[in-house]
Amino acid sequence: MKRRTNIIAAILHDPKLLVLDEPTAGVDVQSRSMILQFLRDYNKQGVSILYTSHLLEEAQSICEEVVIMDEGKLIVQGQPMALIQQNPACRNLEDVFLHYTGHALRD
C-alpha cells in the first residue's frame, strides 16, 4: 500500500518527469503488475519516467532506453533489445549486465 501511495503522491502535481527508485521492491505480484501497467499508461500520456531498479527483467519490459551503471559509472546505454542483440551470448538484460560487469561477487 505504501508503494502505491508514494506513486500517487508523486503524480499529484502532474509532473513532466517522474523519478522512481525501485517502486516495486517488496510488493506482491498483483501490486507489481498494477504499478507496472500504470507506469506504461502514464508514460504514454507524455510523462518521462526515470526508473531505477535492480530487477532487470522489469526494466527490459517497460523501458524504452536503459543505462547500465556499475560502481557509479555508466557502462552501457541503449534500447533493451538492441543491447541484447549486440551480444550473441545475451538473452536478456541480466545477461548484458553480467557481460559488461562480470560474474564475480562484490564485497
Image (cartoon, helix red, strand yellow):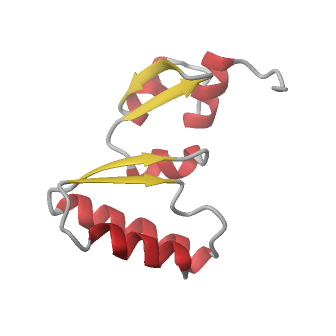
How many numbered marks appear? 0
- Position of the N terminus, as image quadrant, is bottom right
Residue 78: x and y in percent read 36, 27
Residue lying at 40% horizontally and 24% vertically, measured from the top left: 77
Q: Give x and y (percent) for residue 61.
A: 45, 51
Q: Residue at x 36, y 76 (%)?
A: 8
Q: Is residue 96 visible?
A: yes
Image-quadrant location for residue 2: bottom right
Front-lying residue, 43 or 95: 43
Q: Position of residue 52 (x, y in %)?
A: 48, 45
Image coordinates of residue 99 in percent, x first then y, are: 64, 19
Residue at 14% x, 56% y is: 46
> Of 9 and 95, which appears nearest the observer?
9
Q: Is residue 92 visible?
A: no
Give the residue at x 72% y 18%. Answer: 102
Give the side of residue 10 with respect to residue 72, left or right: left
